[in-house]
Amino acid sequence: SFDVTTLCFDRKGAQTPLAQREAYIDAMRESGPVTVVGLPQDGNRLRALGDHLRSLLGRRVFTFYKHDSAEFEQALRRLLNEQTFDIVHVDSLDLSRFLPLLSGIPVICTHHNVESALLRDRALTESGARRAYVLAQAALQEGEEKRWCPRVAMNVTVSDDDRETIRSLSPDSRVETVPNGVDTELLVPDWSAHEQGIVFVGGLGWFPNRDALEMFCEDVLPAVRASMGDVPVTWVGRAPDTDISRYSREYGVSLTGYVDDIRPF
């Protein structure tokens, strides 16, 4: 029913092959015009360090500065001047620095997680100065959630637990759950193979996945193999070559790295 105008960052650090990124962009253009802007921090360690310092000095969450892009802001202002939009979908509060520009337009914000809660969970795995920093970021992120969740027209969470967490942080916020989905026609297990094994799908670029892999190998896998023998374990998703080598050598776990199609696994 609607024409869709897309403005997004291209995170080249996500390791998605260039040809596939281009295919994604072409697919989005079937719904309307697409503008893609590079993420300023990509490949720039000095910029990343500077953004961490700006976060501490400016008392705003790190992602507020990470997405500080004059090119993105100019593209957004140009679109707002050229067109009238019925609604804006913002894919997480990582983009909160741009929300003031959307005054007067209904905004739907998706929360893939309640990031402040996720950061507090991560702090439990850290120590010393790193733990203090992560806790500081959790507090700053919670401030961002309290500031913006009640101001947008609708917040979308992927679980009822996350919905209730946001409501507890900001009782005046409108929140609805739209669960994560799986295409059950595309992703059909091949039971005819009758192969034994364990498969996990998820890249190691996200800390909870890395933490889960570490815990699985240290605490769970020995019990599984003591009970069932040398069960093959495959972790499908982006992973550095150093991790692929290490987990194969130390635990006998196969990390595939990025794959074009997860169905064979």
Image (cartoon, rainbow, N blue to C red):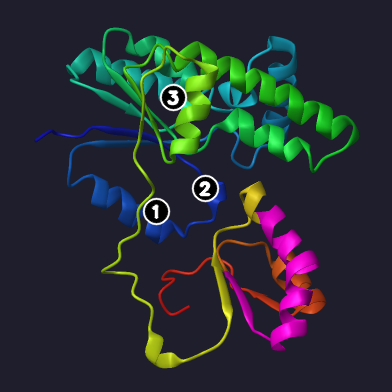
From the image, tell me which residue sits under label 1.
Answer: 21
Q: In this image, 186 relative to 129: left or right?
A: left
Residues 215 and 243: in front is 215
Badge 3 or badge 2: first in the primary sequence: 2
Residues 143 and 242: in front is 143
Q: Amino acid at mark 1?
A: Arg
Q: Are marks 1 and 2 in contact (CB under 8 Å)?
A: yes
Q: Which residues are magenta?
A: 210-235
From the image, tell me which residue sits under label 3.
Answer: 71
Q: Amino acid at mark 2?
A: Lys
For the residues labelled 3 and 2, the Cα–Cα distance comes to: 16 Å
Query: Residue at the spot x=44%, y=24% of the render?
Result: 71
In the rendering, at what x and y percent does residue 22 appear? 35, 53
Query: Residue at the spot x=88%, y=30% of the render?
Result: 129
Query: Residue at the spot x=18%, y=18% of the render?
Result: 83
Badge 3 or badge 1: first in the primary sequence: 1
